[in-house]
């Protein structure tokens, strides 16, 4: 084992663990368990809010997968990554204060609470909960596999041992500390990601002899690397641009991100978070992907994309600093996984159990059950990650786009369009998930765009047309909803 | 709309502010997109031999990804400082536990 690389990472794990356990002390004094455990009692300040949003969204792919692709594609892939700057402000601005106000009016703790209050439908709740559980369960597993492999490659421990070290530390603090522990650890993880990004970028530029030198080197390797189109001119403008839906504005439909838009304390928290979030996400995306491109000039000939970042860090930095940089992808994975774990657990406990199985469960029982469910879900994912089944890996490919296609319109139009109703929401969720699954599976390159584009358009059309066509149904209920949501 | 206005109700006055801010978010994203796309594909579609370079970066990349990021950040700060309003989010008239 390379101790000078491993040591900073071990220190990092310990710090995260302590911080998470420390945040868990809030669980004792709370008088509203569910609100505290799944939403941190809506007390997040601006800095923590920004960090938890950015880190939940930024995952292994921002630190390992993405830079690996950038290595092969060149600056065109940095261009694509920079679309994500929009996520730093768009979600909080567009859902905005109205979402925060309505979440309070309806006492929503989860995204599904919001959908339930807006659409008043058992089917919307159950379909949404299932969509979240299935897609996020598989994303969680794939992040965990990534984390295990990363520790394995850095420390030389076996994959299973690496996976356990990694997963158990996350599981413990999420289980006992809930949302607040997640947000507090996300903040530390976000700082590590930010510092790690700057370090590797500077290290790479220095090792490559300055930006001008690196760029001319890249140009001599393949001029396509410094164009927006890639080395074989394979990425058209329409293809890259279509990612504005998947990793840009479409993020407003991701439940793990939107639930955070109901967690802040006051307007000022939101204001600060928008500024900080935009800066942090921009620096991370620019820095990591640019480092990936520059790595091509510094150490050409790497065959496996996922190895670019670890090899680059070991080459251009002293070992202990490489350890700090490589803690960044770990931080990214942990900060994504902890949010997903809690969200899956909230869907099971709050959205399904308390809504339809045992609405009158006592506070004590809910408390015990929530922690048990979180722990058990985590352990199941962990066990499945030891030999990940194909189905899980396959489902994960669909997770991001599937969730966006399902939820973007029921959330956004539910918030801003009074005529949107239950039937529109159901049609939107079903058509979004179905069309996305079919297109992703059979025609992933349809119209040379990301497969999420058409499903988002279909689910919009379904929401609008079905809502309008069923305007006359359940008018009474609709009017009550409107009074509750829009009334003073 | 008629059928919902049978018994007119007063809309939450905070929504006027919230809606305006959301609209600014959408406009900002549009500006962000146009800047990003315009510089990347406006300048980046030329042959590599005729590229200009700024601080070592190809001009299309510098303007689209680096300067673009700075400009968007500045716009976000301007929006937050001068347009966004500090409004209460809590429902002052209703007590916790009261559902309607």
Image (cartoon, helix red, strand yellow):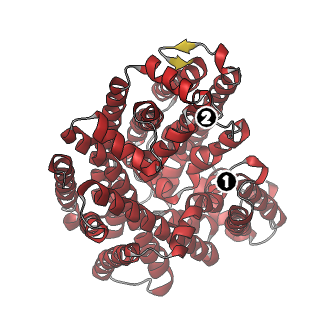
Residue found 46% across the figure and 17% down from its top: A212
Observer-nearest residue: A91 or B85?
A: A91
Picture layout, residue B58 above or below residue A366: above
Work out whether residue B91 can be spotted.
no
Q: Which mark is residue A75?
A: none
The reply, left or right, for residue B15 in relation to residue A104 is: right
Residue pointed to by mark 2: B29
Residue found 79% across the figure and 57% down from its top: A461
Indicate the quadrant where residue A340 lies: bottom left
- Determine the chain carrying the residue at label 1: A
Q: Secondary structure at mark 2?
A: helix
Q: Residue furthest bottom?
A: A357
Observer-nearest residue: A214 or A403?
A: A214
- Determine the chain carrying the residue at label 2: B
Number of marks present in the image shown: 2
Residue found 61% across the figure and 34% down from its top: B29
Q: Secondary structure at mark 1?
A: helix
Image position, residue A311 (x, y; %): 34, 44
Within-10-Å neighbours for mark 2: few <14, some 14–19, many 20+: many
Residue pointed to by mark 1: A413
Work out whether residue A64 can be spotted.
yes
The reply, left or right, for residue A5 in relation to residue A163 is: left
Image position, residue A410 (x, y; %): 64, 60
Measure the alpha-carbon separation of dots 2 and 1.
18 Å
Residue found 57% across the figure and 36% down from its top: B21
Query: Which is more foreground, mark 2 or mark 1?
Result: 2
The reply, left or right, for residue A334 in relation to residue B76 is: left
Picture layout, residue A138 above or below residue A70: below
């Amino acid at each position: 084992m390379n101790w000078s690389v491993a040591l900073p990472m071990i220190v990092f794990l310990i710090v995260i663990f302590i911080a998470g356990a420390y945040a868990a002390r809030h669980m004792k004094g709370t008088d509203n368990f569910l609100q505290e455990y799944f939403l941190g009692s809506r007390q997040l300040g601006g800095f923590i809010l920004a960090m938890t949003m950015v880190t939940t969204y930024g995952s292994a792919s921002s630190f390992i997968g993405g830079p690996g692709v950038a290595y092969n594609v060149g600056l065109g892939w940095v261009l694509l990554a920079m679309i994500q700057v929009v996520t730093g402000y768009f979600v909080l601005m567009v859902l905005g204060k109205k979402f925060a106000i309505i979440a309070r009016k309806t006492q929503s703790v989860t995204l599904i609470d919001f959908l339930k209050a807006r659409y008043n439908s058992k089917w919307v709740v159950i379909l949404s909960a299932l969509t979240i559980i299935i897609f996020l369960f598989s994303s969680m597993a794939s992040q965990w596999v990534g984390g295990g492999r990363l520790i394995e490659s850095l420390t030389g421990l076996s994959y299973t041992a690496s996976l356990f070290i990694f997963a158990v530390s996350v599981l413990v603090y999420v289980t006992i500390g809930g949302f607040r522990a997640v947000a507090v650890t996300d903040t530390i993880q976000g700082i590590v990601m930010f510092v790690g990004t700057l370090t590797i970028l500077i290290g790479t530029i220095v090792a490559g002899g300055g930006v001008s030198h690196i760029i001319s080197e890249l140009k001599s390797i393949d001029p396509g690397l410094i164009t927006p189109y890639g080395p074989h001119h394979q990425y058209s403008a329409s293809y890259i641009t279509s990612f504005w839906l998947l990793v840009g504005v479409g993020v407003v439909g991701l439940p793990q991100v939107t639930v955070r838009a109901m967690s802040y304390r006051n307007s000022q928290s939101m204001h600060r978070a928008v500024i900080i979030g935009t800066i942090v996400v921009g620096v991370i995306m620019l820095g990591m992907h640019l480092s990936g491109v520059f790595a091509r000039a510094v150490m050409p000939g790497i065959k496996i994309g996922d190895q670019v970042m670890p090899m680059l860090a070991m080459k251009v930095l002293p070992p202990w600093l490489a350890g700090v940089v490589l803690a960044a992808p770990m931080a990214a994975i942990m900060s994504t996984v902890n949010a997903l774990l809690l969200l899956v657990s909230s869907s099971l406990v709050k959205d399904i159990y308390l809504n339809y199985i045992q609405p009158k469960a006592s506070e004590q029982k809910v408390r015990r059950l929530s922690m048990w469910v979180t722990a058990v879900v985590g352990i199941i994912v962990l066990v499945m990650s030891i030999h990940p089944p194909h189905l899980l890996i396959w489902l994960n490919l669909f997770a991001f786009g599937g969730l966006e296609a399902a939820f973007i319109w029921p959330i956004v139009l539910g918030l801003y369009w009074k005529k949107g109703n239950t039937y529109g929401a159901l049609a939107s969720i079903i058509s979004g998930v179905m069309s996305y699954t079919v297109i992703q599976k059979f025609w992933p390159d349809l119209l040379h765009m990301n497969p999420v584009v058409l499903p988002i358009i279909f689910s919009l059309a379904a929401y609008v047309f079905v809502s309008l066509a069923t305007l006359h149904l359940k008018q009474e209920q609709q009017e009550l909803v409107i009074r509750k949501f829009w009334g003073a | 709309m008629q059928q919902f206005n049978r018994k007119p109700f007063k809309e939450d006055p905070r929504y006027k502010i919230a809606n305006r801010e959301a609209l600014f978010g959408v406009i900002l994203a549009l500006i962000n997109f146009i800047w990003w796309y315009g510089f990347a594909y406006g300048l980046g579609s030329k042959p590599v031999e005729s590229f200009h370079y700024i601080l070592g970066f190809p001009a299309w990349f510098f303007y689209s990804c680096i300067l673009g990021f700075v400009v968007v950040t500045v716009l976000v700060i301007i929006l937050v400082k001068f347009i966004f309003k500090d409004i209460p989010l809590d429902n002052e008239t209703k007590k916790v536990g009261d559902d309607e």
